[in-house]
Amino acid sequence: MDSIIFTRIKDLCAENDITVNKLETELGMSQYSIGRWKNATSPTIEKISKIAKYFDVSIDYLVGATDIRTPIDTVMCDQDFVSLQRARERMTDRDKSRMMAMLKVGFDYAFSDEKSDKSDT
């Protein structure tokens, strides 16, 4: 089975119509270096960081620590997120549960038309 980092890089390359070989060239890496990560060899943090920046994803996403692609610095600059985080820090556990329930209802409602559009096709 392929390593998670190799799989995610391969998938990102496919999504962006670029070969792994071309990615290596564009990042100044030796040919087949990413291929060696398929099974056993682990990349350096510098190489992972270059690839994350290239695809604008988080390092955590590349290494499989999360399924969220957005880099944290992008999230942290979002004023809505900052406002929610500040409010959350002052909440009790009960308030946090209520907030998450409200957000879930709001998202379910906001995107319910997308679900019905997809099922109509």
Image (spheres, rainbow, N blue to C red):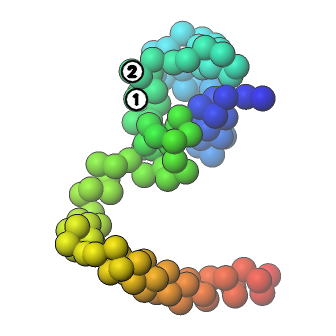
- Looking at the rendered image, the quarter that the C terminus falls into is bottom right
Percent coordinates x, y for residue 84 in the rendering: 27, 72
Q: Is residue 116 above or below residue 100?
A: below
Percent coordinates x, y for residue 95 in the rendering: 32, 81
Q: Is residue 82 left or right of residue 6?
A: left
**Label 2 amino acid?**
Glu
Q: Is residue 47 left or right of residue 72?
A: right
Q: Is residue 70 left or right of residue 88?
A: right
**Residue lying at 46% horizontally and 27% vertically, measured from the top left:** 48
Label 2: how many Cα within 10 Å (few below 14, some 14–19, many 20+): few
Percent coordinates x, y for residue 106 in the rendering: 46, 86
**Label 1 amino acid?**
Ser
- Kindly identify which numbered label has been placed on residue 46: 2
Return the residue nearer the eye: 6 or 64. 64
State the separation of the CA atoms marked 1 and 2: 5 Å
**Considering the numbered disc 1 on the image, is that residue within a helix, a strand or a loop?**
helix
Can residue 2 be seen here? The reply is: yes
**Considering the numbered disc 2 on the image, is that residue within a helix, a strand or a loop?**
helix
Mark 2 and mark 1 in contact (Cβ < 8 Å)? yes
**Residue lying at 52% horizontally and 47% vertically, measured from the top left:** 66
Q: Which residue is mark 1?
A: 49
Q: Quadrant of residue 89?
A: bottom left
- Kindly identify which numbered label has been placed on residue 98: none
**Residue lying at 29% horizontally and 48% vertically, measured from the top left:** 73
- Looking at the rendered image, the quarter that the N terminus falls into is top right
Q: Is residue 5 above or below residue 39?
A: below
Percent coordinates x, y for residue 44 in the rendering: 45, 17
**Residue lying at 48% horizontally and 50% vertically, measured from the top left:** 69
